[in-house]
Image (spheres, rainbow, N blue to C red):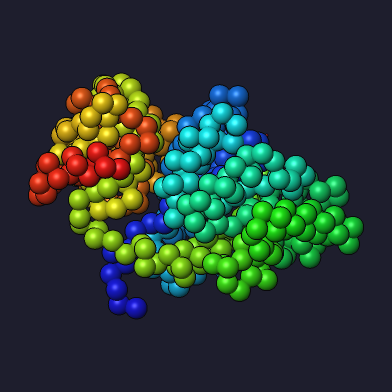
Amino acid sequence: DTRDPTSLRTPIVAVLGHVDHGKTSLLDKVRGSAVIEGEAGAITQHIGATAVPLDIVSSIAGDLVNPEDFDLPGLLFIDTPGHHSFTTLRSRGGALADIAILVVDVNDGFQPQTLEALDILRRSETPFIVAANKIDTVPGWNENEDSPINATYESQSDRVQGRLDEQLYEIIGNLSDEGFSADLYWRVQNFQRNVGVVPVSAMTGEGVPDLLAVMMGLSQRYMKEEMEIDVAGPGVGTVLEVKEEKGFGKTVDIVLYDGTIKADDQIVVGGQNEPIVTDVRALLQPRPLAEIRTESRFEKVDEVGAAAGIKVAAPDLEDAMAGAPVRVVRDRDLEHVVHEVEAE
Ligand code: GTP
Ligand code: MG
């Protein structure tokens, strides 16, 4: 394949699921930091974005992800809150996603926000896999830190294996009740037709290599065409949050899903009354593997390409709205771009 890999953008992966089922812990495990420590009441109240480059995906997934086999640049994870009052944030995460991970606690099984997340995925026709989390809590579990699932499964007693199987088949049954044909991921041939279930532990990292491998494989196999974008084109994104930032005034945290945004671009942002036309003052990027939500020291950058989470500082953002579109004007007709933002 001689195609320029920079013409493929990073797939956006939404992590959805019921409260406390382990969404943030799973991302924590992946990025090896402890965002969870800084969370108010351990409840995620805002969507965060975490970029994981392919080389890191590969170093975690080991033999399961050979970087030579992929030309997608990595994965951009969007964490969402599971608490019942945050439906809007979940929908926003779901709407942005190319692909999703539905996290289900193996002990707790399907819960109200599991079903709500399934509805969001169904409506947006987002392909997803299920992470059957907390497998380490099966009584008698023998931990094998960061091991792929087959190796750790083989090291469990018959009783533990039997118990886990029961829990997994319960989840597969629940998915079937909701109209999704599902199976353990290694039995799934066509991930477009069947939902793959990946047993994991966010605590011990067991199954996490499999989860990343499946996400990379799925993206590469089925999403590649959608990932082919005009890399140098004017950026398009969605506002996740409007936030006061020391020294910058009101800023917007956006997820850019197409094109680029530059530090001297004119942009149009959806506002409470009318679209806001403004000039970027600074693009503030969290370091790779850092969490935009808790990262306080940002690096000023000249340009960012999709997909990425980026903080944009600009004048007149007081009326900007979470969930609103953002579009870069560049050499396009301003009126036209304003109409596009109004129409979204
Ligand atoms: P919300 O953001 O509030 O919806 O929750 P969440 O889905 O992000 O859950 P979170 O990651 O905050 O985890 C909830 C609790 O479950 C924490 O106490 C975690 O330590 C625990 N937990 C998460 N994953 C695992 C796991 O794989 N094994 C065990 N034993 N505990 C886990
Ligand atoms: Mg969380």
Residue 342 drawn above or below residue 53: above
Which residue corresponds to the image point at 30% horizontal and 77% vertical from the top-left? 2
Instruction: Give percent across and percent down for residue 57.
Output: 49, 58
Q: Nearer the viewer, residue 128 or 69?
A: 128
In the rendered view of the protein, which quadrant contains the C terminus?
A: top left
Q: Nearer the viewer, residue 112 or 145?
A: 112
Answer with left or right where residue 126 lies relative to residue 163: left
Q: Nearer the viewer, residue 39 or 241?
A: 241
Residue 317 drawn above or below residue 128: above
Which residue corresponds to the image point at 64% horizontal and 44% vertical from the top-left? 114
Which residue corresponds to the image point at 51% horizontal and 51% vertical from the top-left? 123
In the rendered view of the protein, which quadrant contains the N terminus?
A: bottom left
Instruction: Give percent across and percent down for residue 254.
Output: 34, 39
Question: Which quarter of the figure has residue 148?
Answer: bottom right
Q: Nearer the viewer, residue 300 or 177?
A: 177
Q: Is residue 199 visible?
A: no
Residue 147 drawn above or below residue 107: below
Answer with left or right where residue 108 lies relative to residue 286: right
Q: Residue furthest bottom?
A: 1
Instruction: Give percent across and percent down for residue 244.
Output: 33, 22
